[in-house]
Image (spheres, coloured by chain):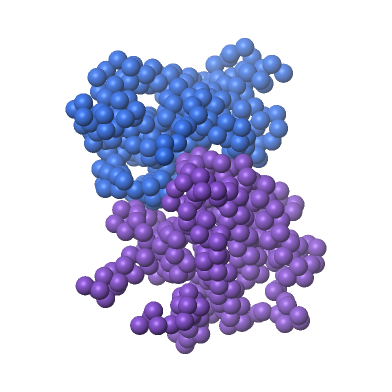
């Protein structure tokens, strides 16, 4: 059935489903709190789609991605309030700075493998978080700071509804860009790199260049989501870029499904809704979160969406 | 001038001793299973917290220390048995996520059982500071350094002079060959986790009178211990101990002379600089990929 769709549609099947879900979801949202949760899920999803390009397709882990999210958020907050920049200008500046920073650190650290890479990205995340915590005259320190309202061409996004459509559109854009990237020659090179890095190098793929490229792209996605987050949240505080937040992003990517764009979205949404759903059992939250992390990796190491997709396929062709 | 320098170095050696213990724990588990156990910091907290709880229940300090260490070792073995062994052939990313999951899980259990308060223990032998060339030294720091050194010597003896220790080393070099020689590699994994839980627990207990303990205090200590292990070259026990001491001293000196706000960042700056120039740590061998 699906194979009868034209190729362009088939490639973007996930995107079309996602757009449809985003279009009808407001029917189920009753109040601003619901909207707020869904908006945060969407922002997390943007980061996780980018991070999954790195983890799932390039096979490189980052335990410091919250730092890029946080830098984007602080760039928007500082530039729009302290310096009165327009929101889009601040966002672009944040993305550019994060991209350059990611490029500078990526070349030396992406030569590292496995645990050493985990350590290096973790270290960068912790250092950035300590700097933002300490330089209080610029960042507001532990109390944080807030960004100016998000105004584009004279229109200010104020209501939760308007934010919903903004973040929904941003997520669709991210998914579209990522799907195209995966199907491009770059994506194929990345998959070769994940499968067998030395093999890829032997057939002439400049593996370091592709790893650096994907690291920079995923950092820029995180910064983009961070900027939007800064305008939506009342205050940006250093807690959004700590080690724990970085781990949460990795968990979302892995739980939803490594090397799966839709898996990233599903993982981000479930892991964002979970703490809200479990609010009554607040004391058990870390136990449940830790249990999910261990259980997913032991029982379905490919993650939720690829595992379910495989089960469905098996049913179709007995 | 020289007094303050000695003061900083003493402080650095005290925290460095703990980083060394944690780093050694990382190395032992890494050797046995090529797993980086991100739950290492939780062993410190479980050791410290259980001792506090046992003493509050009226158990005398020496017995409380022994019992708390045993509890932590049991937790370590349970972790190996129920989380690491079932995922034996998973790749590095999956194993990292499992042990991070385990650390969050254990932190949640600690918070549920012992609460969110910060606890302390009484110093083992009084609070009267000693004078050392013009610098003051708390007796508890001597306990930390003494017990850590003793433990490190015992661990070195265990790996070099006992059959069990040699079996563990053999597994680290080549698990398949070790299994063919009759080494029970499952047992090796359990012992490695028990050993590093012991190191973490004892480190956590002796340092609690100085730094206090709360359900969250394992995060930073665990990461610093990981830095120590990476600094020395993963899997290199001597390197991990040296890495821990270097880290402790540099951290204390830069907190004293540069900025105390950036004290926690120092460890990570050192580790990044080292990794850029020596991707396998200070004392690590250059790895060769087998295709």
Across and down, in percent, residue A111 comes to 56, 41
Is A63 placed above or below B282 here?
Answer: below
Across and down, in percent, residue B141 comes to 50, 23
Q: Is B163 or A173 nearer to us in this picture? A: A173
Q: Is B89 or B141 nearer to us in this picture? A: B89
Quarter of the figure with the N terminus of chain B:
top right
Q: Is residue A164 visible?
A: yes
In the picture, measured across the screen, residue A179 lies left or right of residue A312, that is right
Residue occupying the point 55% across, 48% down = A204
Residue occupying the point 55% across, 50% down = A205
User: How many numbered dots are placed on residues in this image?
Assistant: 0
Across and down, in percent, residue A221 comes to 60, 63
Quarter of the figure with the C terminus of chain B:
top left
In the picture, measured across the screen, residue A89 lies left or right of residue A304, that is right
Is A18 placed above or below A255 here?
Answer: below
Is B149 placed above or below B114 here?
Answer: above
Q: Colour of chain A?
A: purple
Q: Is residue B198 visible?
A: no
Residue occupying the point 78% across, 62% down = A82
Residue sitting farthest toward the left: B182
Q: Which chain is blue?
A: B
Residue occupying the point 67% across, 17% down = B3
Across and down, in percent, residue B150 comes to 39, 18
């Amino acid at each position: 059935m699906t194979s009868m769709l034209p190729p362009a549609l088939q490639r973007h099947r996930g995107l079309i489903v996602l757009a449809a879900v985003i279009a009808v979801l407001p029917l189920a949202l009753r109040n601003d709190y619901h909207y707020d949760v869904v908006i945060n899920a969407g922002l997390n999803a943007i980061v996780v789609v980018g991070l999954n390009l790195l983890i799932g397709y390039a096979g490189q882990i980052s335990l410091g991605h919250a730092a890029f999210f946080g830098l984007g958020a602080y760039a928007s907050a500082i530039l729009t309030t302290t310096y009165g920049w327009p929101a889009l200008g601040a966002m672009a500046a944040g993305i550019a700075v994060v991209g350059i920073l990611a490029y500078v650190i990526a070349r030396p650290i992406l030569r590292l493998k496995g645990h050493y890479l985990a350590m290096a990205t973790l270290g960068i995340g912790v250092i950035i978080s300590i700097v933002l915590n300490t330089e209080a005259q610029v960042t507001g320190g532990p109390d944080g700071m807030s960004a100016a309202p998000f105004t584009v061409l004279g229109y200010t996004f104020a209501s939760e509804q308007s934010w919903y459509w903004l973040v929904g559109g941003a997520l669709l854009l991210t998914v579209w860009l990522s799907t195209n990237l995966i199907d491009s020659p770059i994506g194929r090179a990345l998959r070769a790199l994940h499968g067998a890095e030395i093999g890829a190098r032997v057939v002439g793929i400049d593996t370091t260049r592709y790893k650096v490229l994907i690291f920079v792209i995923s950092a820029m996605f995180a910064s983009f989501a961070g900027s939007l987050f800064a305008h939506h949240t009342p205050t940006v505080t250093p807690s959004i870029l700590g080690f724990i937040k970085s781990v949460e992003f990795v968990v979302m990517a892995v739980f939803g499904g490594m090397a799966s764009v839709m898996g990233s979205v599903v993982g981000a949404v479930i892991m964002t809704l979970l703490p809200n759903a479990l609010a009554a059992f607040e004391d058990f939250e870390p136990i449940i979160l830790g249990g999910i992390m261990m259980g997913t990796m032991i029982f379905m190491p490919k993650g939720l969406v690829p595992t379910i997709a495989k089960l469905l396929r098996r049913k179709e062709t007995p | 001038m020289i007094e303050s320098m000695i003061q900083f170095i003493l402080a650095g050696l005290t925290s460095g001793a703990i980083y060394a213990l944690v780093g050694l724990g990382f190395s032992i588990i890494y050797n046995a299973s090529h797993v980086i156990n991100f739950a290492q910091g939780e062993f410190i907290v479980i050791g410290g917290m259980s001792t506090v709880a046992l003493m509050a229940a009226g158990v005398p300090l020496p017995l409380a220390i022994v019992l708390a260490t045993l509890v932590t070792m049991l937790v370590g073995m349970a972790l190996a048995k129920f989380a690491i062994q079932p995922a034996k052939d998973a790749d590095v990313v999956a194993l990292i996520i499992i042990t991070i999951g385990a650390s969050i899980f254990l932190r949640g259990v600690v918070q549920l059982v012992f609460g969110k308060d910060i606890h302390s223990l009484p110093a083992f032998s009084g609070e009267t500071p000693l004078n050392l060339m013009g610098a003051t030294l708390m007796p508890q720091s001597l306990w930390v350094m003494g017990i850590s050194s003793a433990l490190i010597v015992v661990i070195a003896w265990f790996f070099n002079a006992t059959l069990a220790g040699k079996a563990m080393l053999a597994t680290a070099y080549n698990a398949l060959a070790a299994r063919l020689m009759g080494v029970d590699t499952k047992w090796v994994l359990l012992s490695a986790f028990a050993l590093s839980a012991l190191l973490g627990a004892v480190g956590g207990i002796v340092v609690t009178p100085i730094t206090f303990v709360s359900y969250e205090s394992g995060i930073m200590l665990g990461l610093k211990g990981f830095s120590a292990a990476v600094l020395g070259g993963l899997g290199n026990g001597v390197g991990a101990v040296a890495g821990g001491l270097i880290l402790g001293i540099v951290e204390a000196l830069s907190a004293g002379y540069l900025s105390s706000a950036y004290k926690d960042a120092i460890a990570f700056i050192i580790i990044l600089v080292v990794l850029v120039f020596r991707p396998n740590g200070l004392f690590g061998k250059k790895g060769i990929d087998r295709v």
